[in-house]
Amino acid sequence: MRKTLLGAISPEEFLREYWQKKPLLIRQAWTDFPEIIDYARLAELAERDDVQSRLIEYKNERWQLESGPFTPSRLKRLGETDWTILVQSVNHLVPHISELLYRFNFLPYTRLDDLMISYAPPGGTVGPHYDSYDVFLLQVGGKKRWQISSDDARALSKMHRFAY
């Protein structure tokens, strides 16, 4: 039996209740998809100069942002906590990932730009921010604390995040 794409939420309910209305975090969103990608493969992509990647790391008592590409030695220096790596457009780089994005064929095609994938050990974050566009972020491993601000929920209304 195939589990629905959005956990227990149907595409119709997603469009009616969440799409461009309010943020949504779905844990264990997909259980029937082969391995998405692991940290080693994500790090390998982040080392390429034709791939957009970012590293957010807590050091010297503040959060710092670095843009890739990253050297293998740089990634090996990461601690056990307090960082996040993000890789943009993974669906254009790993063929079977595009199949995952196209499972969202109930959304307007123009809204399905790319799939960003992140990995964060305990303490990893991207920090407080809001997105002015639709965001589909797939967290493939590690742990991340997801928070939605009540100050300006409307500004955050286009965020849709999925944890694999």
Image (spheres, rainbow, N blue to C red):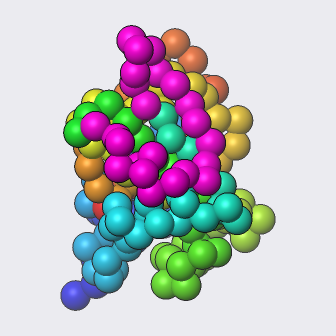
- Give the side of residue 3 with respect to residue 37, left or right: left
Q: Position of residue 36 (x, y in %)?
A: 37, 73
Q: Position of residue 137 (x, y in %)?
A: 50, 52
Taking the view exactly as shown, the residue that stands out farthest to the right is 110
Depth order, front residue of 127/130: 127
Q: Is residue 47 above or below residue 97?
A: above
Q: Position of residue 26 (x, y in %)?
A: 34, 52
Q: Is residue 134 above or below residue 110?
A: above
- Residue 29 found in image quarter: bottom left
Q: Residue at x 70, y 43 (%)?
A: 133
Q: Position of residue 148 (x, y in %)?
A: 43, 27
Total labels: the figure holds 0
Instruction: Give the quadrant of the C terminus.
Output: bottom left
Depth order, front residue of 26/114: 114
- Give the side of residue 114 with respect to residue 128, left or right: right
Depth order, front residue of 61/13: 61
Instruction: Give the quadrant of the N terminus.
Output: bottom left
Taking the view exactly as shown, the residue that stands out farthest to the front is 73
Q: Find the magenta span and give its range.
A: 57-79
Q: Residue at x 54, y 51 (%)?
A: 70
Q: Residue at x 41, y 14 (%)?
A: 60
| Residue 122 shows up from this direction | yes
Q: Is residue 142 above or below residue 13?
A: above
| Residue 144 shows up from this direction | no
Q: Is residue 90 rendered magenta in the image? A: no
Q: Residue at x 32, y 31 (%)?
A: 82
